[in-house]
Amino acid sequence: MEYLNLSEELWSKRVCEPEEIRHIVDSRFKPLVNDIMYSMVPSRLYEMRGGTLLSLAKPKLAYGTIGVTMAIKNLFGMIPTPYRGKFHGRNDSLLNDSIMDICKTCRSVFNVSGIIEAIFSTPAADELLLKSKIYRDLGFVWGAKSIFELDVLIAIQMGFDIKDVRHLALAAQTFGYLPQKIIEVAKKHPVRL
């Protein structure tokens, strides 16, 4: 196993040529909203292209513009800089597009799978108190080869309409919609935090 500090790779300018990344991303998806993302893929990560990238996340209820975070939002951490404020934008105005940009980039380089875990605990924002609340002993774990399908199914199980979760609505436009039969199954098996 190898430890790779993505920020150090970026700061040391050990990154891929932006045009190479642009070519592979744009050949699969609509162009990224933020062009700087094309220049932020560490070369060492790119050498591992075609491999599996596992997004291991907790299901989290969040206040503000995001609503719920899971495997897709978890990829936001793959932006190789600790200074991600500019990717959030003022009042999170850029956050959903930034999430989709990094998701499209990762999916163009790797086979991205996901595991969402809430076996013992998971946090949720308490909007009234503006702090986190911890839910314990839920006993849930989900996994899928498609992080989009994974997030959508869990969001539906949690009672969300994906049209109201902006990054999932953008993901549906990008990656396609789920068959109605799968959505109906998710609705029949709700999960409440």
Image (cartoon, grey):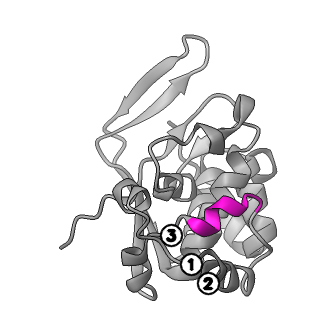
Image height check: is 49 above or below 185? below
| Residue 159 visible in image | yes
Q: Disc 3 vs disc 1: which is toward the camera?
A: 1
Are circles 2 and 1 on residues that touch, CB within 8 Å?
yes
Which amino acid is tagged 2?
A: Glu
| Residue 144 visible in image | no
Name the residue tied to disc 3.
41
In the image as oriented, which residue stretches furthest toward the front? 12
Q: Main secondary structure of the magenta part?
A: helix
Q: Residues within 10 Å of mark 1 (few under 14, many from 20)?
A: some
Asked if residue 170 lies left or right of residue 73, the reply is right
**Which numbered circle lies on residue 20?**
2
Asked if residue 148 lies left or right of residue 131, the reply is right
Are circles 2 and 3 on residues that touch, CB within 8 Å?
no
Give the residue at x 73% y 44%: 94
Which numbered disc, 3 or 1, marks the residue that appears first in the sequence? 1
Image height check: is 180 above or below 50? above
**Residue 30 found in image quarter:** bottom right
* Horizontal and vertical percent position of residue 100: 68, 60
Which amino acid is tagged 1?
A: Glu
* Horizontal and vertical percent position of residue 31: 78, 72
Q: CA distance from mark 2 to mark 1?
A: 5 Å
Image height check: is 55 above or below 52? above
